[in-house]
Image (spheres, helix red, strand yellow):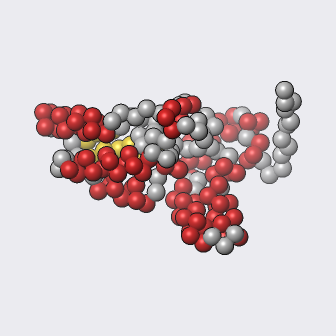
Amino acid sequence: ACRYCSSPGMTGPKPGRWRGRAVTHMVDEIEQLHHRYGASSFNFVDEDFLGHNRLAPERAAAFAAEIQRRNLRIAFSIQVRPDSLDETTISLLTSSGLVYVFVGIESDDPEDLQMHYTAMLAHRGAGNMEAAARAETLFKRFKAEESAQAITGDRRRAKPEENNERQMIHEHEGVRLR
């Protein structure tokens, strides 16, 4: 889960905490705007358009299918968490007009950003090559880019004490448990 997510309801174990608008209602509104006003480009300002990871593939498929069923020729952009995307989801959405995806940066901590790499190595070690291949694909797709480092750079330089995980040698301070 995001360390600095502004939507704490997204981080819980219960996908029911996130309430997405019904796909048919969204597409009804898109269709109305498209036909009545000629709108052809839509930017969904939703911190996670696809919803909880377990819901994301189904929601993406339903949205793409509804856009295509109504033969709407539109372009749209969305915001998502990187772990709610996969090749199938991207392909489905692209075929229905997706042109831009804003992917939230989960963390500027290299240990977090290397999660998929570690999973790939663990699956390889366990002999599960199918899971290792999937983790490798995700690692290559979501690995930290220089642009992400530029976005977080000013804060990291201004507050180095908040970035212990980025330091070559660091200590973790203990906390008393109640």
In the image, 121: left or right of 56? right
Q: Residue at x 59, y 39 (%)?
A: 13
Residue 118: horizontal and vertical position, in percent?
68, 60
Q: Is residue 10 above or below residue 70?
A: above
Q: Nearer the viewer, residue 1 or 55?
A: 55
Residue 174, x across and y down, in percent: 86, 36
Residue 117 vertical placement versus 9 (above, below): below
Q: Is residue 102 visible?
A: no
Residue at the image point whose x is 69% and y is 64% from the top? 122
Identify which residue is drawn at 34% across, 56% down.
Answer: 92
In this rendering, does residue 32 appear at all?
yes
Number of numbered discs visible in the structure rendering: 0
Left or right: 167 as drawn, with respect to 85: right
Residue 47: % across, % down: 46, 36
Q: Residue at x 51, y 32 (%)?
A: 17
Residue reaching furthest to the left: 36
Considering every residue shown, the one lying at the far top of the view is: 178
Residue 26 drawn above or below residue 63? above
Q: Position of residue 53 (x, y in %)?
A: 50, 46
Q: Quadrant of the N terminus?
A: top right
User: Is 19 or 102 nearer to us in this picture?
Assistant: 19
Image quadrant where one finds the C terminus: top right
**Direction from residue 118 to residue 161 in the image, left or right:** right
Quadrant housing residue 39 = top left
In the rendered structure, the answer to whether residue 139 lies left or right of residue 61 reads right
